[in-house]
Every structure is written in C-alpha cells, then in structure tokens.
Image: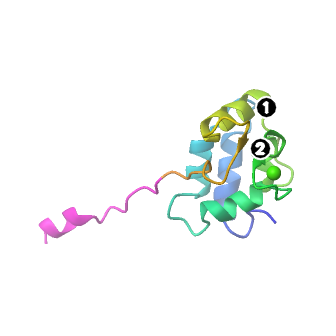
Amino acid sequence: MAFSGLLREEDITAALQACQAAGSFDHKAFFAQVGLASDSAVAAEKAFRILDRDQSGFIEEEELKLFLQNFKADARVLTDAETKAFLAAADLDSDGKIGAQGLKFPRAPRAPMGPRHHRFP
Ligand SMILES: [Ca+2]
C-alpha cells in the first residue's frame, strides 16, 4: 500500500524532484506539493496507516526515513537530519515517534472565488 494511485502521478514526480538533493526535504513543502492538504481526498488518518508500515500505531524513526519511498519505490531515504527535523515537528509528546495526532497536512490554498466575489457582481 502506498500513495501512488491516490495522488496525481505528476504531483508526486514534481514533489520528489524538488527534494532530490540530500538535505533539501521539507515536509510541509512536500505535503503541499504532492497535494496532501487538510481537505484533500487522502485524509491524514489514511496517510498515517500507509506510513505506519508495521501497523504499530506509531510512525517510528526508521519508518520516517523511508517516507519518500511510500510515494515512489526508488525514491531516496531521508537523511538523519531530515528525519529528525520531520520527527521533531510531528512528535507532539516527544516520545521519539509520531502518533496519529502528529500527522497534520497544511490547509489547502483558498480557491480564488471566495466571499469577496459577491461584492462585485
Ligand atoms: Ca510503526
């Protein structure tokens, strides 16, 4: 089980290309690029189950290292620094692993047609 088929192939390719260089991974930018937003079709709970490869209920450091490979099997592994930064951002109770509450997606950018649209009919 992986994200391919759930997300647009071209978004995955672009997101992986953007963080191809070791040290350039930023999980927030990656989520946004790949189309994982708070209201996307792939809910955070579903993504969590994919990332939690051994179904332990937590995303451990070893699983987090393989993060990019959930999107493409031959993607690189995260560096130790990238893994630790990602972990630090999502490990809410500082137990060294990510719980189900820790995985948050950024808010999707607002569609250009907001309430303001109605002011100028
Ligand atoms: Ca796990």
Is the residue indicated by label 2 positioned so its CB lies within 8 Å of ligand 1? Answer: no
Q: Earlier in the sequence, mark 2 or mark 1?
A: 2
In the image, which disc is placed on residue 105? none
Is residue 113 shown above or below 85?
Answer: below
In magenta stretch: residue 119: yes
Residue picked out by circle 2: 64
Local packing at callout 1 (Cα closer than 10 Å; few below 14, some 14-19, many 20+) is some
**Camera-nearest residue between 101 and 7:** 101
Is the residue indicated by label 1 positioned so its CB lies within 8 Å of ligand 1? Answer: no
Answer with left or right where residue 101 lies relative to residue 95. left
Residue 27: image location, x then y, percent: 63, 42
In magenta stretch: residue 98: no
Look at the numbered disc 2 and give the secondary structure of its residue.
Answer: helix
The quadrant in which residue 34 appears is bottom right
Specify the quadrant that holds the N terminus.
bottom right
Residue 107: image location, x then y, percent: 46, 54
**Camera-nearest residue between 116 and 60:** 60
Residue 25: image location, x then y, percent: 67, 37
Residue picked out by circle 1: 79
Q: Amino acid at mark 1?
A: Thr
Q: Amino acid at mark 2?
A: Leu
Is residue 120 shown above or below 57?
Answer: below
Specify the quadrant that holds the C terminus.
bottom left
Residue 105: image location, x then y, percent: 55, 53
The quadrant in which residue 97 appears is top right
Tell me which residue sits at (33%, 61%) in the image. Answer: 112
Q: Which segment did they paint magenta? A: 107-121
